[in-house]
Amino acid sequence: MIYRKEKNLINRLPELVSAALLVYLAICMIRHFLITVPFPYPVEYGEGVIANWSLRLSQGLLLYPAISPGDIPWLHNPYGPLWFHVVAPFVGFGKSVFLAPRLLSVIGFLFCLFFLYRLSRRDLAPAAALGACALFAASPLVWRFTAMARVDIPALAASLAAVWLMEMAIHNTGRTRKSASGGLLQTISSESESNKHPLDSWFWFLAGLLAAVAILIKPLFIAALLAGVVIGFRKGRRTFAIFAIGVIIPLLIAGIWLIASGNTAIIYHYGEMNGIGSSLRTLLRLALTVCGRHPFIFAILLFGLWTGNRHSPRWWFALFTVISLVTSAKVGADVHYYLAPIAAAVLLAGPTARRFAGHKRIQTISWCLAAQLALYLPIAAQPVFTATYGQEVPAGQTILTPVEADREIGRLLVEEIGAAKGPVLTDDIGYVLSAKKQIQLQPFQYGWLVRRGRLDPSPLLQKIREGYFSLIIIRVPRPDGTGASDFPKEVIETVEKSCKLAREIGPYRIYARGAEAN
């Protein structure tokens, strides 16, 4: 009997390890959300872009204004119009302009988990489906973008909702469910599965609508739409037509709104202003970075694509999600391109587990889950700068959770910007919004267009020489060369020659025009 108990404990060891890791990661995630969501300052550059366009819309300004090289403000909007309409009514909620979009992103995260769980339950028992969802929820990469004022998580939630509705349309869910294979897999009663749900027409229509919603939030989230096109075409003309109508209606409404509201420059924002160049090096760097921390996730994804059901919306969504990673070969691309592939791996975890379980490898699966969760363990945030002469506070680290140095840097920068009498030009535009001032220029897009020879910086350089800006805030690089300013070298050189260095705060040098240098 003792031997049996010991053997049972050994067999359950991977489950116990996974449970312990999940508890720890859940605590870390909740702590991250509680610190980051109410954090009054930006935690990355992109938050300033989202918050700014939401704020502009709430003020009745254009989302896609016509921009010429000499214009100030010089602003670029790379996103769809829908999310800004969702955020704009709440942008004044709380003391920070970032609070509402962050909270809405967290709500999107909860919807992602709901749809991942419902889709996983097609193949997995409840506990196993929760374990699969944990692969997504426990990833610090997912935490990072969930607690940000970003569009990625809401767009993913809309995509997963569309896939779930497609699955609902082609599988009758009114079946008896029971567990098999030690509670890992989901089996169905002996009743034959229906190939058509009574409400399949509505499901296909709503799936098309939500696939369009994902695109109207962020155009790169096209995988759900493509999956619906393939499956709808295979199911017949009627299904394809219903899905297409669901897609076309919101896109048509959006097009009419863009024309009626004078936002026709969207083509310029998506086209010429977005042409900052491709980078194969960026694609490879991101792939190695993300796969290095999510090896078992991507093993599931690749195995699921190799062996999965080609008639399933989940499979096609996963395929198009992987194909879409080619868009990460872009200057400035970040790890958020991998949010959808991680979710797609969860969708294929059930079919993959079925194949392994047939070979009595359930314990191997459990150990893989534990190993993947162990790779998620976050490293404590540490400042990446040390104080140098003239710096009032060391630079903080906002890769994951803001620390006290980040808060102090934000407070000092916002005080400086708020006290400025005129316009402020800065590397990190979110601080300008925190100071309740207007963003003058988005340096990342502007800088790369200048470097590519697609934009003449002369008008901006002339304004700097004339003292148009009260303050210009330049970010200095880390000792390893990363984190450098987004402004092109012509701008930095002109600032150094025409303005006086007034102060250093963390990684930022604050330059003032002569009359305000003190």
Image (tube, rainbow, N blue to C red):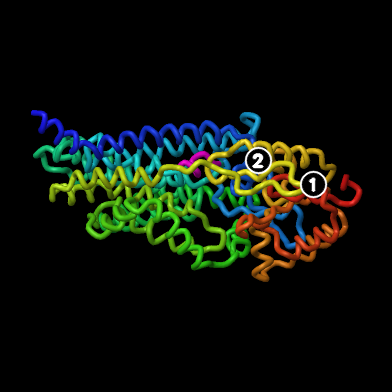
Number of residues whose C-alpha sits closer than 10 Å to that of mark 2, classed few (under 14), some (14–19) or many (20 or more): many
Tell me if residue 147 is in the magenta stretch: yes
Tell me if residue 229 is in the magenta stretch: no
Tell me the distance, in whole angstroms, between the alpha carbons under discs 2 and 1. Answer: 29 Å
Give x and y (percent) for residue 176: 15, 34
Q: Nearer the viewer, residue 235 or 185?
A: 185
Disc marking residue 503: 1
Residue at disc 2, secondary structure:
helix
Quadrant of residue 18 within the rendered picture: top left
Instruction: Determine whether, in the image, residue 511 is placed left or right of residue 222.
Output: right
Instruction: Compare marks 2 and 1 and give the one earlier in the sequence.
Output: 2
Q: Nearer the viewer, residue 343 or 26?
A: 26
Q: Nearer the viewer, residue 83 or 425?
A: 425
Instruction: Determine whether, in the image, residue 28 is placed left or right of residue 84.
Output: left
Query: Could you tell me which quadrant the C terminus lies in?
Result: top right
Give x and y (percent) for residue 286: 47, 58
Q: Amino acid at mark 2?
A: Leu
Disc marking residue 464: none
